Amino acid sequence: MSGEKRIYSFEFFPPKTVEGIAKLRDARKQLAQLDPKFFSVTFGAGGSTRDRTLETVLEIKADGLAAAPHISCISSTREEIREVLLQYKNHGFRHIVALRGDLPSGEASTSELRYAAELVEFIREETGDWFEIEVAAYPEIHPEATSARADLANFKRKVDAGADAAITQYFYNADAYFRFMEECDSMGITIPIYPGIMPIYNHAQLARFSAMCGAEIPRWLTLRLKDFGDDIASVRALGLDVVTELCDRLLTGGAPGLHFYTLNQAGAVSTIWQRLGI
Ligand code: FAD
């Protein structure tokens, strides 16, 4: 690994219940000790979590920690997005994760901004350089992309529109990330691209997420996880080994840092962190 400082960040979703809020506070306290650059908080498509995303980032900020709210453009009007941006700006947030978002199936889109590249352009038009903007990247190709090349061209549009950095969809195949980095390099894309890391908490849940977002779980891993059935301890033990090895390969191979999808839990991330000796 080079001597350059790596950047780490942790993602939460806004909790819905009193228990969820308490659980997230505990997780945040534990993860804050690892001194990440920021905690990001997801945003439901169409603004469905708007208030809870704001409450969650405000609570993180009140603890003296850096927070980056996500924002999505699907099913929102320009005016609604403008309001959300102003709200974050007025609260002093300087960092945002800009996404298109996904609609719950069956819902019609009323989006004025159709793609994340248009959202990034809009954020720059409305707020200039106020926000540091992160966007999503897909080393294993976004499931709706018509081709790998078209998806890469879209990623470049987001960068050209003003993204400062990117976080990838999760993956378990480090080569997909390294290949993607080579392709970005050949397109003249130089922004940092942080691998998104999904610890393995539960096989059925992971299989469901992965089917939706196009992340590939290697066949050998699926079969081994299936063998464990309801034996959650063994699923997690194998998951920790596999994900720690993946992170190690990524960092050794030059990844500029890591972004962890924590699912509001601190345990797996803390163990991976210790094993990596970060
Ligand atoms: P885009 O970059 O707009 O791409 C979407 C699709 O459209 C791609 O297939 C792309 O190739 C294609 N495309 C883009 N431009 C064009 C064009 N001009 N013509 C034709 N096709 C085009 N979702 C949420 O709802 N809330 C969140 O908080 C959230 N956080 C996320 C965080 C990270 C780090 C990641 C990786 C994903 C997150 N998502 C979130 C999921 C994300 O919204 C979905 O993956 C969504 O399907 C695509 O979002 P995007 O910003 O990558 O979209």
Image (spheres, helix red, strand yellow):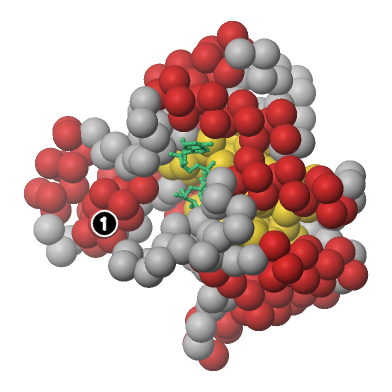
Residue 204 in sight in this render: yes
- The residue positioned 46% from the left and 16% from the top of the image is 179
* Amino acid on which the number 1 mark rests in the picture: Arg
183, above or below 215, in the image: above
Q: Quadrant for residue 217, please give it.
A: top left
128, above or below 108, in the image: above
Q: Return the x and y of residue 95 as percentages of the image width and height.
A: 78, 52
Number of numbered discs: 1
Closest to the observer: 100 or 79? Answer: 79
Q: Return the x and y of residue 191 as percentages of the image width and height.
A: 71, 27
Q: Return the x and y of residue 194 as percentages of the image width and height.
A: 60, 35
- The residue positioned 45% from the left and 25% from the top of the image is 150
- Which residue in the structure is indicated by mark 1? 208
Q: How many residues crowd around disc 1 within 10 Å: few (fewer than 14), some, or many (20 or more)?
A: few
Closest to the observer: 11 or 77? Answer: 77
Q: Is residue 267 left or right of residue 192?
A: left
Residue 277 in sight in this render: no
- The residue positioned 54% from the left and 90% from the top of the image is 18
Regarding mark 1 in the picture, which secondary structure is present there? helix
- The residue positioned 67% from the left and 49% from the top of the image is 119
Q: Quadrant of the C terminus?
A: top right
